[in-house]
Structures are given as structure tokens and as C-alpha cells.
């Protein structure tokens, strides 16, 4: 009702010149904008006002210019837009915000027009240029992102041998554009504990060198998880600096709200520490991944979810049901025409989790009474989601539940009525009509490949979908995203499902008002209405007034968060930190608090071999070994390699969660590994006596090691 009254007031003001509804009308505005095309995004048809006033970070007035100018005071800044367009700040429908902290320190390898990675030689050249420009020393990891194997000419794909030849002295990891895998050289494979002996786990892909078991190309999905779970530690100062740099990428694209769409506990801790330091210049909404939910709830109680604290909030839970269609790991009801990514026949892809686990996960989130976003690409994955939604509700649809399906690319037309019935919002990915259309048609056929992201049919059915870039899978370019929804033209210039085109206004709705609804923030964002946050973007042209094919050429001139310009802005003009970083050299990992105390504690920087565990002597050919180094814990248990993080502070030790290569071996070694890993979880102290290391739990020695010779 409150929202309806605001709309009625604004409509009366615009159409009838009635007295404006103004917040703090007696006080002068901080900013007055006029002289351009101020598009409010209110209503089903485009509505413009002559002027907009901002006071204390919120919209105080939207209407006639003469009435706005009456709010001018001595300190009011009056901005003449000079014909440019002013809109609500863009809201990220889905992405992976946490990666923005890293990609500023990685090589950008998207294929043209978004990057230089048109073929293998171009990728190698860019990696070499990047390494030389950054003066990366021997032995340091080099990471690139945006590699798209689907557009490599003549099917010549990047492989391990290419990277080995170019980088014999550095581990190199080239992340797939889907973010679901990577190509690595030999040193990187060794770093992450992947070898010819590594078995391909269920739901995973390891492309092997022909005639051997050696990993040679892409490693994807569950096989990539041990890599994805390992991240290099950051210092406290880096966390703040990289947070600012990452959020500026969003600001440059006109975005004032970012989405972190699959958050693990360590990443939440990173975001929270940066938040507490006052680093955020935009809003960040995080959705913890379902596998981390219990750990997250122990540290971030659900009672604290759903509301911002210093521009950060936890919005709900993320569940992933399948992989990527361009990587041929999305789950379909019919086989891929090209087979599987490793040559599998009659390949339909695989679900990330079986249906019974998906049902239980959805029910768990429903019982928590929090929103959920569900990654669904293939039509079979969407079927799984609909079944799980029905299971969680168990026939009771009285209680509102904010549910969004992410990507929803291969939604069938017969699935749309269920979305309407269930009041589920699809978040589409229309950029695929440009970047990956030819690949989808080759994999899925013309009819299904052209129907991807059916936004027109969804809107006509009464749904209010959002649109997204899935950054870093696609670049942060909101005008390119809008262009793709309006035009649906492929990289090769073909029309891709023209019946699913939307108007520019509808496309903007999916980036503003409807996106605000997705996050339950429709009362504060998404339209230019009195009382809402002054989250604004200024464009050099009005997207509604240019030819559809020219939309992607529109540029962001200025981005404003709560009345303050954040782009363009030099670092000195950004909002100051709320606290001082007292220990800028303190080091954190993505998974737990760690401290690199190798220079202080003699346990660090040495390889230790297990000799006794829980009072029993170890008598095996290859006993477990352990290395503390630079905040990372590396273990070889005899069969598997385990990695994690640690903190050594004087005589105390904190162990982080361990990621394992998940290989099978002799039962006695597997039992020893399991017992060792369980014991480490309880360790809270250590002592070094020459070449002997002891680990303790509650004052009792639980493990004894000898330093390797």
C-alpha cells in the first residue's frame, strides 16, 4: 500500500502538476538534477520527470523543475545533465562478487570483443604480457580468467603442454569462462595435488592426454572443487584495497548493488572483515552455498540475515543443480548433439546432487524462512528444481517465499506456467545469445538453442524476470547485457530467437525495479521515487531513444551511491575507512583466519612426518607428512593430498577446513588418513623440540612428527 501511494503521488505530480510529496521539505536539497532525460522506471510505460532532488542520501523530490529549484539552498549543488539520461542505479541480478577482488590481479582472457583470447597463441601472448608487466617472479602462481574453449578456431584448445612450454618456472591456471573449471600447467597441477592417479569424481570432468591418464586439458565441475576451494591468502590491507578495487568495477558499469552468488564461509568472513573496516562503496548481497550453510549459521545467525550493516547483508541461500551448457555439463532431458566434454556418448549432463538431496536442501531453506537462489541451466535441472520446490512446500503455498532460479537458460515453454503458479522469479542470462549462441545451437540444435533465456514469454506470462552477467563469466557491461536482451543477435551476426526480444524499457526493468524485488528491496531501490535511496546512474544517452543496435555503445558517465558520486572518483575521493587497520600485514585466507608466523614459530616452513597418532606408532611405507607455510597447510596422507589453512600464534594453532583430492586407496591407509584428518580438527596447541613437533588437544598430545631430513 505504501508503495502504491508513492506511485500515485508521483503520477499526480507529473501529470497534473500537483504539490510534490517531499521528505524534509523545509531543508535545502544536497543535489538537484535537471536538464536531461530523468527516467523514473515507475509503471508499465516509460515516465520522465524534469528534475530530481537528493537530500541525506535519499530522493527528496521528483517532478517539475520549478518546484525542485524551490528546494535550492546556498550549499545545494545544481547539476545540469545537458541532455544525458538519469536512471536508478543498476542492480546485479546475479554474479560472483568475491571474484572481483581477485580479477584485478589476474590476466583477462575473454575472447573478442571483450578480451584478447581469440586463440591459443593469443592467450599465451596475453599471459606473457601480463606476467612481464607485473614482474611476476619465478615460482609465483599466474592466473587468467575468461578462457572460452567454445570459440577456439579449428577446435584447437588450450592444453597443459602449451602452458608448460610457455611457463616452465611458474604454476599457471587459466580459469574457464564458466568458472566451473580450468586448464593448468604441470606446476599448477602439482600445486593442487592433481595427477594421473587422480580419479575423476562423480559429476566431474578431467580431460586426459590421449593414450594416457595424465590431466591435459580442462578440469571441471566436482573435479575442480579442490582447486576452487583453495585460494591464496590476503593481508588485511589487501582485503580492503581489493574490496575497493573490485567494487569500482561495478561502479564503472553503473551498478550500485552487487551479488555474491555462491558464498563459502571463508569468503563471507572476508566480506565481513572488509565491511567492518568501512571498505564498501556499494551494497553487497551474499548467498551462502548450501554445503556451507551449517558452518555459516554457526557464525552468522539467521536472525541477522536480510538487513544491511555497512552496505552488506546475507540475502539467502544458494543451491546449484547442474553445470554450464557451453561446457556441456548442464543437465538436460535429451543428449547433447556433440557428446560430453570428455567424449562421452549419449551424454545428457549430470545433476550436481541427486533429487533426494535437492529436495532436502530446498526443505531446509524453506524451514529457515529465508530466500533461495537456485542455479538451473538445463531443462532437466529446472524439472529437478520444480520437483524440489513442490516437495519443500508440501502443498502449502500460503507463506510467501522469495525464490529465484539463476540462469534458467534452457527453460521449456511448458515449464513457465509452473513458475507463475509457484511465484518463482527467473533470472535470465541473455548475454548467451551473443557470446555462446553458436555453441548452444551446435550442442542442442537450432530450436532449443534459439529459445535460451525466453524473457519475452516469461514477461507475457506475468513474471518479472531479472537479467545478469554472471560476472566473471561475462564482463560487467550492463549496456551490453541490455543490448543482448533487446536484439538477441549472436557473435556471428545471426538472430537468436527473435520472438523472445524485449523492449529496452522491459530490459531496464530487469536491471532496476524487478532486480530490487528479487532482493526484497523494492521499498528502497529500483525506481526514482520519493524516500528511496539516491542510487543513481547517468548515461551519455537514453537507451529508450537510440536505435536498438546502438544500445551497447552507450557509456556510463557517473555512478552515484546514496547521493555520493563513486564513479568517476579517485581513491582519495572515496568514502574514508571507518577504522584504522592496526596490523596491515596480518594474513587471511578465504576459508579461515590464518597468520603467517613462519618467521616466528619454528614449526613453519618445515616438512613434518607423522610418527605417532593418538598414542599409536605409525608403521606404514608412506606415513602422512605435513607442511605449514605462508598460511597454507599441505598434507600428504599416503593416498590423498589435503590442503587447508592455519594460524600459528605463539604456542596455539588454529586449523581451517581441509580440502581433499578424494582418491581411493588401500583400506588401512584410508582409515589412517581419516583418523589423521579428524584429529587435526581438534588441535589447539603445538610444541617444537628440535626436530620433533607435537600437536595437542586440550593439553593432551594427539600427534607426534619428526622433521624430514
Image: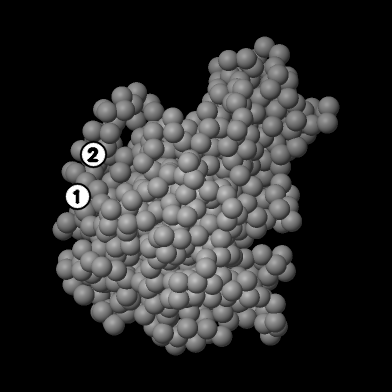
Q: Residue at x 73, y 20 (%)?
A: 651
* Marking on residue 119: 1
- The residue closer to the viewer here, 417 or 249, is 249
N-terminal label among 2 and 1: 1
- Distance between the alpha carbons at the discs numbered 2 and 1: 11 Å
Residue of label 2 = 126
Q: On screen, 623 above or below 495?
A: above
Q: Is residue 620 visible?
A: no
Q: Residue at x 35, y 53 (%)?
A: 538
The residue lying furthest to the right in this view is 699
297 horizontally vs 322: left or right:
right
- The residue closer to the viewer here, 335 or 442, is 442
Query: Tag 1, which secondary structure?
Result: loop
Badge 2 density bin: few <14, some 14–19, many ≥20, Cα 10 Å: some
Q: Quadrant of the C terminus?
A: top right
Q: Is residue 315 visible?
A: yes
Query: Nearer the viewer's eye, disc 2 or disc 1?
Result: 2
Amino acid at each position: 500500500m505504501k508503495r502504491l501511494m508513492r506511485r500515485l503521488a508521483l503520477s499526480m505530480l507529473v501529470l497534473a502538476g500537483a504539490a510534490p510529496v517531499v521528505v524534509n521539505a523545509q531543508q535545502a536539497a544536497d543535489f538537484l538534477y535537471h536538464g536531461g532525460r530523468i527516467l523514473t522506471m515507475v509503471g508499465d510505460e516509460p515516465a520522465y520527470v524534469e528534475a530530481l532532488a537528493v537530500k541525506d542520501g535519499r530522493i527528496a523530490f521528483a517532478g517539475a523543475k520549478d518546484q525542485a529549484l524551490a528546494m535550492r539552498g546556498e550549499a545545494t549543488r545544481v547539476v545540469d545533465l545537458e541532455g544525458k539520461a538519469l536512471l536508478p542505479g543498476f542492480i546485479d541480478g546475479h554474479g560472483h562478487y568475491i571474484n572481483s577482488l581477485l580479477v584485478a590481479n589476474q590476466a583477462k582472457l575473454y575472447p573478442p570483443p571483450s578480451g584478447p583470447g581469440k586463440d591459443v597463441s593469443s592467450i599465451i601472448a596475453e599471459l606473457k604480457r601480463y606476467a612481464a608487466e607485473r614482474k611476476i617472479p619465478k615460482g609465483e602462481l599466474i592466473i587468467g580468467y575468461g578462457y572460452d574453449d567454445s570459440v577456439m578456431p579449428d577446435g584447437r584448445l588450450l592444453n597443459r603442454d602449451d602452458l608448460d612450454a610457455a611457463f616452465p618456472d611458474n604454476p599457471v591456471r587459466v580459469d574457464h569462462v564458466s568458472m566451473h573449471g580450468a586448464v593448468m600447467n604441470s606446476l599448477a597441477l602439482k600445486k593442487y595435488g592433481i595427477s594421473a592417479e587422480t580419479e575423476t569424481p562423480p559429476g566431474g570432468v578431467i580431460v586426459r592426454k590421449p593414450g594416457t591418464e595424465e590431466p591435459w586439458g580442462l578440469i571441471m565441475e566436482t573435479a575442480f572443487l579442490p582447486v576452487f576451494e583453495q585460494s591464496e591468502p590476503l593481508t588485511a590491507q589487501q582485503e580492503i584495497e581489493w574490496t575497493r578495487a573490485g567494487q569500482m568495477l561495478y561502479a564503472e558499469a553503473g551498478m550500485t548493488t552487487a551479488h555474491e552468488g555462491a558464498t563459502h564461509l571463508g569468503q563471507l568472513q572476508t566480506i565481513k572483515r572488509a565491511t567492518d573496516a568501512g571498505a564498501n562503496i556499494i551494497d553487497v548481497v551474499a548467498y551462502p552455498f548450501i554445503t556451507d550453510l551449517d558452518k555459516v549459521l554457526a557464525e552468522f545467525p539467521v536472525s541477522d540475515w536480510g538487513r544491511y550493516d555497512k552496505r552488506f547483508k546475507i540475502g539467502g541461500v544458494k543451491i546449484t543443480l547442474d553445470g554450464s551448457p557451453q561446457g556441456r555439463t548442464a543437465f538436460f532431458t535429451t543428449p547433447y548433439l556433440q557428446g560430453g566434454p570428455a567424449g562421452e556418448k549419449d551424454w545428457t549432463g549430470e545433476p550436481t546432487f541427486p533429487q533426494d538431496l535437492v529436495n532436502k536442501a530446498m526443505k531446509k531453506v524453506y524451514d529457515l524462512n529465508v530466500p533461495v537462489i537456485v542455479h538451473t541451466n538445463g531443462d532437466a535441472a529446472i524439472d529437478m528444481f520444480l520437483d524440489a520446490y513442490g516437495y519443500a512446500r508440501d502443498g502449502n503455498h500460503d507463506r510467501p517465499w522469495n525464490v529465484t532460479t539463476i540462469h534458467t537458460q534452457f527453460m521449456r515453454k511448458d515449464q513457465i506456467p509452473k513458475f507463475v503458479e509457484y511465484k518463482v522469479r527467473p533470472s535470465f542470462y541473455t548475454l548467451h545469445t551473443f557470446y555462446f549462441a553458436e555453441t548452444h545451437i551446435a550442442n542442442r540444435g537450432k530450436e532449443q538453442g534459439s529459445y535460451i533465456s525466453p524473457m519475452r514469454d516469461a514477461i507475457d506470462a506475468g513474471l518479472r524476470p531479472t537479467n545478469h552477467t554472471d560476472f566473471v563469466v561475462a564482463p560487467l557491461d550492463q549496456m551490453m547485457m541490455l543490448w543482448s536482451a533487446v536484439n538477441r543477435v549472436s557473435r556471428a551476426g545471426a538472430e537468436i530467437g527473435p520472438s523472445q526480444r524485449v523492449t529496452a524499457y522491459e530490459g531496464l526493468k530487469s536491471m532496476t525495479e524487478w532486480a530490487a524485488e528479487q532482493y526484497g528491496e523494492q521499498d528502497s531501490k529500483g525506481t526514482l521515487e520519493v524516500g528511496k535511496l539516491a542510487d543513481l546512474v547517468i548515461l551519455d544517452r537514453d537507451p529508450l531513444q537510440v536505435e536498438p543496435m546502438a544500445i551497447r555503445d552507450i557509456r556510463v558517465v557517473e555512478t552515484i551511491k546514496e547521493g555520493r558520486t563513486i564513479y568517476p572518483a579517485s581513491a582519495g575521493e572515496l568514502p574514508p575507512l571507518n577504522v584504522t587497520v592496526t596490523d596491515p600485514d596480518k594474513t587471511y585466507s578465504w576459508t579461515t583466519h590464518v597468520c603467517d608466523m613462519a618467521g616466528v614459530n619454528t614449526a613453519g616452513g618445515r616438512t613434518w612426518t607423522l610418527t605417532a597418532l593418538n598414542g599409536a606408532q605409525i608403521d606404514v611405507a608412506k606415513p602422512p607428512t605435513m607442511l605449514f607455510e605462508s598460511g597454507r597447510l599441505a598434507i600428504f596422507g599416503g593416498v590423498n593430498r589435503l590442503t587447508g589453512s592455519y594460524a600459528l600464534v605463539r604456542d596455539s594453532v588454529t586449523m581451517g577446513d581441509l580440502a581433499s583430492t578424494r582418491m581411493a586407496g588401500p583400506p588401512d591407509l584410508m582409515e589412517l588418513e581419516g583418523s589423521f584428518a579428524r584429529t587435526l580438527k581438534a588441535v589447539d596447541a603445538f610444541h617444537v623440540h628440535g626436530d620433533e613437533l607435537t600437536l595437542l588437544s586440550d593439553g593432551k598430545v594427539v600427534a607426534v612428527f619428526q622433521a624430514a631430513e
